[in-house]
Image (spheres, rainbow, N blue to C red):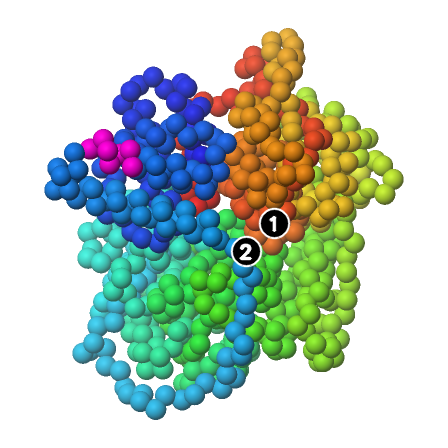
Amino acid sequence: GSCGFNSVSQIFSIVSNFSFRCLLELSLSRLTLDYLAMESRRQFPKRILWLPVSCCLAIPLLCITSYLAPLSFLQAQLRSMDQISSHFDMPKLRANSTAAMINSAKKAVTDLVDGLNSRDEKTYKFCDSNLPSEIEPLDDVQEFDLNTTIVHVCIVVSIFDCEDCVSLLLHSILNQTHKGIETVFIDEGSSGGSKEILKISKDYDNVQAVQLDQRTSKGQSYNIGISKCSAKSAYVLINDGHITYERDAVSSMVSYAEHLRADVVLADFDVRATSRGRVLKQEYSHDMNQWSALPAGSPFNIYSEPGVLRVDPSPWRKLYRRRMLLDRLVQFKEGYYDGVDDSFHWEILAHATRISKLDRILFHRETMFETESTPRTDGKFFPNAHHVGKMLMGQHMNEDQGCLPSLSSHSIVEKYFEWVNSNSWLSRNQQSTQMKDKFDRRFKQIRSEWLARETLPITYWESLSEETALPLLETPSQVDLTIIMPTYNVNDLIQDVLDKMYTDLDRPGFSFEVFAIDDGSDDGTIKVLSDFQKKHETNFFLMNTPSSNGGAGRARNFAIPLIEGRYVYFVDADDGYDFQALAESVIFATKDEFDLLILPYETEIVGPNNTVTKGGMMTADEKIWSQLPSKINRTHEIQKEAAYGLINYPWKQLTASRVMHDSDVYFGPTKVHNDVQFHWTSIAAAKKIHFYHKKVCSHRKFDASVRGQLTADKSAARMNVFYAISLTQ
């Protein structure tokens, strides 16, 4: 909440139109109510967002300053609701049900505040026993008749700029023999084409279209779609926009699921190219060996048939029982992920007590909609591998998901290693020996995490094949510091930053690596970086983002999966830095194993003719630092609450790489406010935070006559703060 007010204050300072200011206040109020509704797990009536109530909520909200942390923010919100009640004629409001709405919101805040006050850190624990390796047969199985019983199914389709595929998909879905299908189309910010088709789709019954303002991750798109499914839907199907169905696909899978009471039903698929209804080319699924080994006609689970973990993970080949998704809170991973199918595949199968195989080709992947793509060379596999590995270790589970049986089964862990090893082709795809070695080391890090797992007995290691066991015993060395620096048209600044960085960090016993990620510069920045890389091939990595000028957040995310340092620090090429102080900060943080080290900074105003005026920290941050108690009284809780209130500059902190990897900490996708997500998720994930006195960054603000700077942007792009906050939620 306070994050939103702090960020939007820049907009208020330049907006004079009263109506527009009211609109901003209304948006802030809606954000707050959305947050409260989410946390308290209750749905407020839509009329709570009426303008009168929202404006009244906005008045006290706008008075809350940026240094307030979430708990104190909610307590202030509770007091403000009391004020609202006293300002209104309650009998009249009661007639309009508004009083009930305010009281409902007030109770939600009270429950949340009480929960936060009494919350303890809890470690997820596995159940005492495993799922049975053999599923007990059902004695009361009867043939299920879909002609007499309607079972509702929700099909979630995520599309982007695909006009032809939408029309073909609609035809494939509307021609299904099954009754009771509802379809949710999620358009990921298409520029045209599919957007127009989606408007037409509204003419059909049981078809709804949701248009997102900008492109997001597939995981988030799927999650939005599932949340839009009606409560009557018993099952969910996923479609990535390139899948068509056999006419009886839905009815066959539903009948099978009901017959065997399965949580998940898998069916076979093929890959084909069609034209005017004719199949021009057809290929069968590439996982035939794993698929044929699974039993058909009887339910199983990952303990009785661990091989199911190694079949093609595509979510669109499965029918999911919706109640299981809701009860176990299983969702697709959002953010910087490629192959979200993998992590969802492992998690959903781990939660499923009954899995069934329908041995028919019911799905067709239409290659006519797919564009030619170059072999993948990015590191997006590693976040998924981390997530699945932590889930198997029980460290990524939410206690609200219920308890998982122990996943330390020899065969399941073996399948995990098989999966990790099968992706080692990513190393071979690298164009340089330097990057190939980097990928090899990251694979070793993924594997070596299991060495510390105490629940794996020596008999397990003895049971492993030599091919699986030997890579696990190779523990890669770890450097002290990783620096990540996005660049865009900084030809006049970058050489001095790099020279100072390598001079100051060159000290005995200290190791570091640097990622420079260029975001489509056209001013000679790339040449400077390339020349520098030739001199420092061992620890300087030059990368290029797939799209030009996509923003610093996306550029940083490109390097985060490849971090090897114990700590990571984010550098902006147009700021000044004391890298000697940074090295000393790393040494201090390493000694006490801090998750987060908060660092002070100073500002420099660069005026016309490059005149420099030095200043201290921003007023809000200066106030927080000045109000910190003495070191002896600074508990972790006090420092964490203070950290939440700081401005979300990424260079204000030194972050442990284990926090980044284990808790999936990334930057948001927006060009402006992309550091909002990093700020909140990194602090929330940290277990040990410390405010340190070393000043590292001199944040420069340039006069417009000297150079353009995103920090000074006061355009409509600032409105992305609302999208950034919604992603953070």
Measured along the vertical axis of the image, is residue 542 above or below residue 140?
above
The range drawn in magenta is: 82-88
Query: Are the residues at dot 1 and dot 2 in contact (C-beta closer than 8 Å)?
Result: yes
Question: In the rendered view, does 329 fall on the left or right side of 388?
Answer: left
Please give the name of the residue rendered at 20% of the width and 42% of the height, measured from the top-left corner: 99
Tell me the quarter of the image containing the N terminus: top left
Question: Magenta-highlighted stretch: main secondary structure?
Answer: helix
- Mark 1: few/some/many CA within 10 Å (<14, 14-19, 20+): some
- Answer with mark 1 or mark 2, whichever residue precedes in sequence: 2
Question: In the rendered view, does 4 fall on the left or right side of 419?
Answer: left
Distance from Cα at disc 1 to Cα at disc 2: 10 Å
Q: Residue lying furthest top in this view?
A: 609
Q: Position of residue 496 (x, y in %)?
A: 74, 24
- The residue under label 1 is 687
Residue nearest the observer in this picture, 614 or 693: 693
Q: Secondary structure at mark 2?
A: loop
Q: Position of residue 376 (x, y in %)?
A: 60, 53
Q: Position of residue 689 (x, y in %)?
A: 63, 43
Residue type, mark 1 in image? Lys
Frontmost of labels 1 and 2 is 2
- The residue under label 2 is 121
Q: Residue lying furthest right in this view?
A: 508
Question: In the rendered view, does 286 fall on the left or right side of 652?
Answer: left
Residue nearest the observer in this picture, 146 or 123: 123
Please give the name of the residue rendered at 38% of the width and 60% of the height, measured from the top-left corner: 239
Please give the name of the residue rendered at 53% of the width and 26% of the height, measured from the top-left corner: 620
